[in-house]
């Protein structure tokens, strides 16, 4: 599109641009930043930071200096903590965001029977 003698890209013109835009949108939808994750799982940003420090939270990636979470990993983490009643031990133990011994971390990661 041309306005005022300058070219403005209102829409992608080539297959490569279309593919890049589609990939970027898909990547953005599949990954969430910490504030979005806090809203998604109902925890504070600081609690998520502590989970990253202590290794007790959902999987995450660092892209440059940015922390991102895959939606699938968040759903897996939340589902692992699902219980049907107060007496249900659940699939795994989701530990609180605090320091734990390596043995406690390993034990919590083992599926329950």
Image (spheres, helix red, strand yellow):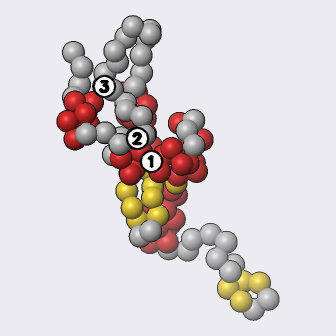
Q: Position of residue 23 (x, y in %)?
A: 45, 60
Per the model, the C-alpha gap separating discs 3 and 2 is 17 Å
Per the model, the C-alpha gap separating discs 1 and 3 is 19 Å
Using the rendered image of the protein, determine whether residue 48 is visible from the camera's viewpoint. yes
Q: Position of residue 67 (x, y in %)?
A: 45, 58
Q: Position of residue 16 (x, y in %)?
A: 44, 72
Q: Determine the residue positioned at 52% across, 54% down.
A: 33
- Residue under label 2: 98
Query: Compared to 23, does 60 lie above or below?
Result: above
* Residue nearer the viewer, 25 or 64: 64
- Residue under label 1: 50
* Residue nearer the viewer, 20 or 42: 42
Give the mark, 1 or 2, whose residue is nearer the N terminus: 1
Is 110 left, or right, of 48 in this rendering? left
Q: Nearer the viewer, mark 3 or mark 2?
A: 2
To which quarter of the image does residue 57 belong? top left
Circle on res. 92: 3
Q: Few, some or many C-alpha atoms within 10 Å of disc 3 (few <14, some 14-19, many ≥20)? A: some
Is 10 left, or right, of 89 in this rendering? right
Q: Nearer the viewer, mark 1 or mark 2?
A: 2
Q: Are marks 1 and 2 in contact (CB under 8 Å)?
A: yes
Query: Compared to 2, does 16 lie above or below?
Result: above
């Amino acid at each position: 599109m041309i306005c005022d003698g300058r070219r403005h890209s209102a829409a992608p013109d080539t297959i490569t641009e279309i593919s890049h835009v589609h990939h970027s949108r898909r990547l953005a939808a599949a990954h969430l930043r910490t504030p979005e994750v806090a809203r998604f799982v109902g925890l504070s940003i600081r609690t998520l930071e502590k989970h990253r420090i202590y290794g007790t939270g959902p999987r995450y990636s660092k892209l440059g200096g940015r922390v991102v979470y895959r939606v699938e990993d968040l759903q897996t983490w939340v589902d692992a903590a699902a219980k049907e009643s107060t007496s249900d031990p659940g699939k795994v133990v989701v530990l609180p965001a605090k320091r734990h011994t390596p043995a406690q971390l390993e034990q919590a990661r083992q599926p329950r029977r």
